[in-house]
Image: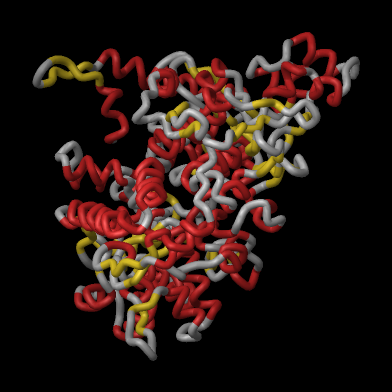
Amino acid sequence: MEMKARTQISLEGLRGSVPVVWLLDTGIISQKTFEELAQGVKTPEEVAAMESVKRYLKGTGSIAGVLIEATKRKMSFYDAMKNNLLLPGAALRLLEAQAATGYLIDPATNRRLSVRDAVRAAVVGEELSEKLLLAERAVTGYTDPYTGGSISLCQALRKELVPLAEAVPLLEAQLAAGGVVDPVHHLHLPLQAACRYGFYDEDLNQALSQLDDSTKIFFDPNTKENVTYQQLKERCVREAESGLWLLPLSENAMFCVDEQTMKVLRSVTVCVNVGRFKGQTVSVWDLLNSEYFSDSRRRELVQKYKDEKAEALQEITTALTTIIQETEAQGKKFAFKGLRKRVSASDLFQSQLIDKKTLDELNQGKKTVKEVTEMESVRRYLEGSNFIAGVLIQPSNEKMSIYQAMWKGILRPGTALVLLEAQAATGYIIDPEKNKKFSVEEALEVGLIGGEIFEKLLSAERAVTGYTDPYTKAPMSLFEAMNQGLIVKSHGIRLLEAQIATGGIIDPVHSHRVPVEVAYKRGYFDQEMNQVLSDPGDDTKGFFDPNTHENLTYMQLLERCVQDPETGLYMLQVVKEGGKYFYIDESTKQALRSRALQVKVGKFKDQTVSVWEVLCSHYISEQKRKELVMQYKSKTLMLEDLISLILKIIEDTERRGEALKVKGLRGRCRCQNCSTLR
């Protein structure tokens, strides 16, 4: 134990360094190898080069590109797609699999690149960057909206941050390329370790082992079969020189849309009256390559044209419009509550908040509007989350609205105004005492705000309801208004940042938040602004901590808030004389994330999880979490003592649950199963 605590050696992994202690804990290296490393008998380079270690540090390789059998030419999936050798959907899935396993690969040069580097190097086109960046999170980690920590693909799936249909192919690829990726420690994990540490589970493993033709989404262009990623990889050839796995393409396999066919399909246009293309005249080719059509349907319609030429065009255009109309008609039957108006299922589909499968399940009665609304991946875009709702005075624990705090002199007018503007721009003005939400006009009527700031808040609320284009009179988003000079850039950045921190950029036309890639398409965001918000400087930190007098981003200030146990609302602490201001800084979180503990009972039974994950679980209240971390930071509670105390809390909670069993309608209910309701 002492040697483990002292050893600070790391090896290079997928996107960062991997502590050798973690390699030992996950069974990748033996105790003997660990000791030889710690004592200098073996060098880190020697251990990293061991085949049994290298496969987890770097993976066994994803499918890198295609090999054209006739010419023996290697080609990236993007180039194969652009040359019409692969269908766009098939190529995108293979590129997403690469991104989710570590890097995009240029088989011509054997370069391995991050998505952003690949776009800069023109290995892939910018039009795919957002989809690939989303897939890349399977390696870099998803952000847990509750703890702020980095979580794996499987954990994000459990929290409904990623739909199952999107997660399965990425997990398939990870398993086939070395194992499930641990984004915290930057490596692939053996299956047993992935399950033990919560990065994977048996249920998901069972589901992946039972994929059938309807759920196998990778496509073998040679046999025209739907296959798993592992099956497709087994059909690849491994190039001796580079070690790359290449998918061979026979002459019959290539989806060759010749120049003449593509020219005709681009020249024939259809006037679309519904859906994403409503009011537009769109080419048959663009419609075929939209989200309304599966790869197999697209291939079938193109082949029909190639077989029958001009005679088939009318039939194809009719089929296209019919499929779009049917899809949209299904969606119009179901309405969801948006920020200011009802939102149809078809809107959710066009905004990529639900997929075609979910839309079909709604139509078939397999899912209800309530069930879809409660999906975390939908709810966060319809409602938002994590708003800074009010002020909590310490040590008295008095809570009040932000406007009230301003009038009592607890917050400076400027500090209060930017927080109220952030509320208005993210949906509603909040009354934290009554846990109610109001539009700006309603907030004025009930006395939640005063008339002197009404116009400023009404202006900020346009980030939700829409700004008016001075030329076309059409509604515009916050970002578009910034670009038109209708609002000051620094003001716009502050509101935009608040929107992103509370669930996503708001589409004022459709009255809900949208994913980043959809915001890009609709002109509500761009890469330059994303870069500004990803790397904030002092000039873009528009919020103020009244306790430390620091300028912060909205997210940084939110992390210093406390959650009201009664309402779940986030409250900005203002510490008065006799009170102590405490927040958990990032370095402390990281230290607690990197320390694992073995749990023997309850929710985490037989798993090894991080100290931070357990501290953020239902076993420990927010107040208790802060108390324990405060003691840990002040060194009145050492790390080993903290772990012992956490394990005792879990065991006591589970023991009480066993002892207190209540009689239910059809039997007995264990109390700890209801503990998350407390």
Query: In the figure, residue 392 lies in which quadrant?
Result: bottom left
Query: In the figure, residue 592 lies in which quadrant?
Result: top right
Number of disc labels? 0
Judge by depth and name the residue closer to the eye, 60 or 574.
Answer: 60
Give the residue at the far top of this rendering: 32
Q: Position of residue 418 (x, y in %)?
A: 46, 73
Judge by depth and name the residue closer to the eye, 531 or 269.
Answer: 269
**Image: 324 above or below 604:** below
**Image: 488 above or below 281:** below
Q: Position of residue 525 (x, y in %)?
A: 49, 67
**Image: 14 above or below 6:** below
**Residue 392 shows in the view:** no
Q: Is residue 493 left or right of residue 266?
A: right
Q: Position of residue 411 (x, y in %)?
A: 45, 71
Query: In the figure, residue 318 lies in which quadrant?
Result: bottom left
Residue at 79%, 24% (x, y): give it: 48
**Residue 468 shows in the view:** yes
Q: Is residue 33 left or right of residue 666?
A: right
Q: Is residue 664 left or right of residue 170?
A: left
Please state, as top left, top right, bottom left or bottom right, where the C terminus lies in the image.
top left
Residue at 84%, 25% (x, y): give it: 44
Give the residue at the far right of this rendering: 41
**Image: 1 above or below 95:** above
Residue at 36%, 44% (x, y): give it: 300
Residue at 29%, 50% (x, y): give it: 567
